[in-house]
Image: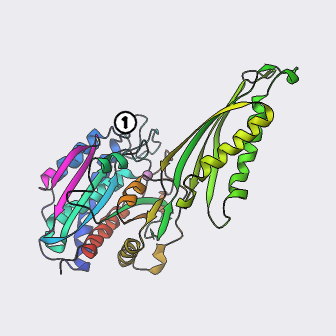
Amino acid sequence: MISTIPSTTADLASIRLQIRSLQPQLVAWRRRLHQCPELGFQESQTSQFIVHKLTEWGIEHQAGIAKTGVVATIVGDRPGPVLAIRADMDALPIQELNEVPYRSQNDGKMHACGHDGHVTIALGTAYYLARYRECFAGTVKIIFQPAEEGPGGAKPMIEAGVLRQPDVDAIIGLHLWNNLPLGTVGVRDGALMAATELFHCTIYGKGGHGAIPHQTIDSVVVGAHVVNAIQTVVSRSVDPLKAAVVTIGEFHAGTALNVIADQARMSGTVRYFDEAYTHFFSQRLERLIAGICQSYGARYTFDYQSLYPPVINDTDMAELVRTVALSVVETPAGIVPECRTMGGEDMAFFLEEVPGCYFFLGAANEAKNLAYPHHHPRFDFDETALGMGVEIFVRCVEKFCPSR
Ligand code: NI
């Protein structure tokens, strides 16, 4: 319980002071969440923890949205716009290797991406805003979303109506980011993260004896040509000023060294930023596969799925976050516009519905050995970033929903 915060209208300096006084609680919540990581759509304890806190603070909320999602609604003193803040809740199927007192207690599961920190920052923001309702005019909806790592909780939450009643005007969200040092914020207009698509392809040849190849259709040879040809999709068919990746991560064929394989299976992922390429890769890949298979007399199946669209930030909302972040990091060098990544995020679905800004909050600290990459079994971040996250969100609310 925190009961020491005086209820006065806060200026910028006192916002910082109040939030800094929250830091020990933020760390405690984050460590508690870190100890009980849960996979996508199974975040029941996480959800209970969130609901418990919101109830304790008298914040209106709805739980059980898209299974484990929670939405908190905080209404300011006067009417005004509606801003949503999104935090993802899920962990990863990774065995934690950190030897810290707050290490994962759930075998084979770990908060290795920092979503425990995202929930904590959103809770800290909710706590602060509920205490200082006079500081903003309008409504803040805090969306605790399940299953970002897969299969994707954003879409079912949108379908459940979390952006309506009241209608959300804009949305913001952050990712703690170990690719950036503590004290920096990665924010930019337009594309921040890539569209994420995947494909599976099986080549059907004709198996036979390894010493009698002329009686066979060698699926390994056909598949190898497909792998090579696919390397030209980005280099020869995509505008060189646009970025894209096609990676074949799996290739399986054969059972013995002297047997010509009947089938070859491959799977891969496609990433790009520009929405103009939305249907391009599925068509280009299949044309290459079909042409190569035909030339060898092989058959194929090709399954292509689009998982997440690109994360596209609205110019005005990115400017709002940039201005606020600058006041928090206090040095222009702390704002990093060159922070795009080919990683994907289902925040993209929210940004398709309403204008918004997703940004990276630098959380790495080499000096404290807190700089392992996301999804690494030794991933951890500098918890100083928790308070910075709350401060950025609170200031964004006060700027987007000004009280006067
Ligand atoms: Ni993540």
Q: In the picture, which quadrant includes the C terminus?
A: bottom left
Task: Report the residue marked by disc 1.
Answer: 106
| Horizontal arrangement in the rendering, residue 388 relative to residue 62 (left or right) | right
Figure quadrant of residue 393? bottom left
- Neighbour class for label 1 at 10 Å: few (<14), some, many (≥20)? some
Q: In the picture, which quadrant includes the N terminus?
A: bottom left
Amino acid identity at mark 1: Asn
Residue located 36% across and 50% down the image: 154
Magenta includes 361?
no
| Horizontal arrangement in the rendering, residue 72 relative to residue 272 (left or right) | left
What count of labels does the image hold? 1
Residue located 52% across and 60% down the image: 275
- Mark 1 residue's CB less than 8 Å from ligand 1: no
Magenta includes 56?
yes
| Horizontal arrangement in the rendering, residue 135 relative to residue 27 (left or right) | left
Vertical position of residue 32 compared to residue 403: above or below:
above
Residue located 40% across and 54% down the image: 349
Can residue 154 be seen in this snapshot?
yes
Relative image position of residue 7 (x, y in whole percent): 11, 71
Q: Which of 111 and 346 lies nearest the eye of the viewer?
A: 346
Relative image position of residue 284 (x, y in whole percent): 66, 49
Vertical position of residue 403 compared to residue 246: above or below:
below
